[in-house]
Amino acid sequence: GAVVSQHPSWVICKSGTSVKIECRSLDFQATTMFWYRQFPKQSLMLMATSNEGSKATYEQGVEKDKFLINHASLTLSTLTVTSAHPEDSSFYICSVLTGTTYNEQFFGPGTRLTVL
Amino acid sequence: GNSVTQMEGPVTLSEEAFLTINCTYTATGYPSLFWYVQYPGEGLQLLLKATKADDKGSNKGFEATYRKETTSFHLEKGSVQVSDSAVYFCALTEYGNKLVFGAGTILRVKS
């Protein structure tokens, strides 16, 4: 399967600042990546679908101006949390769609964001 | 819309006990079904999958069978270990490649 990395693995920032999270597909060229958010002890919530070379598709209720997604290349997607607030504190996980017969997704290790 | 329902946890077992985590789904077509495992502080790892009715997915001693008649995909393991302690997510994907996750079930295995 695809190997996916995320950077940073954890970040603490002050309220009002912006934070960029990178998702890299290390051994697979991914035209589609997904960004999820996970609250403590809860399931994953799909935030958006990131498509290489085009605009991301956001799920209902996700603010596109707050969570900026850029899929700059076939191996890199970034999520920028703009003007972060404490309620944005969460675990953010990306995944890569491999496009195999079973449309498997392989997940990154996640980024823990804490906004003070 | 599509949905996945998992049994609530936490599930607490002694080492070498038999494990069952129930999962049922609602889908309009013929989804692919997955079990993912999440260890503390980590992302999700694909545990096993099944893509059509009566398929059995298996990995690391875990098994799950795609039951179309009961719309279920229960996860089982004959003898759990302490290292199996984690959160287990049942999920499906249908059109558009989007994964729909269940709420997750915490498994705690005591030595």
Image: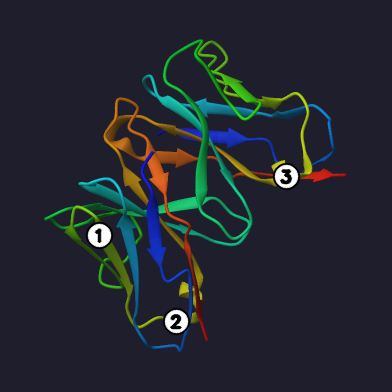
Residue A85 is tagged as 2
Name the amino acid type tagged 1. Leu
Report the chain holding disc 2.
Answer: A
Comes first in the chain, label 1 or label 2 = 1
Distance from the alpha carbon under mark 2 to that under mark 3: 36 Å
Q: Which mark is residue A76?
A: 1
Q: Would you say A44 lies left or right of B6 here?
A: left
Judging from the image, what secondary structure is the residue with disc 2 in? loop
Residue under the point 12% across and 55% down: A54
Amino acid marked by disc 3: Ser
Q: Dot 3: few (<14), some (14–19), or many (≥20) neighbours within 10 Å?
A: few
Query: Which of A77 and A90 lies nearest the eye of the viewer?
Result: A77
Q: Residue drawn at (19%, 52%), measured in percent from left and top?
A: A74
Q: Which amino acid type is marked by label 2?
A: His
What number is the disc on residue B30? Answer: none
* Residue under pointer 3: B83
Rate crowding at label 2 as few (under 14), some (14 to 19) or many (20 or more) other CA atoms within 10 Å: some
* In this picture, residue B97 sits left or right of residue B41: left
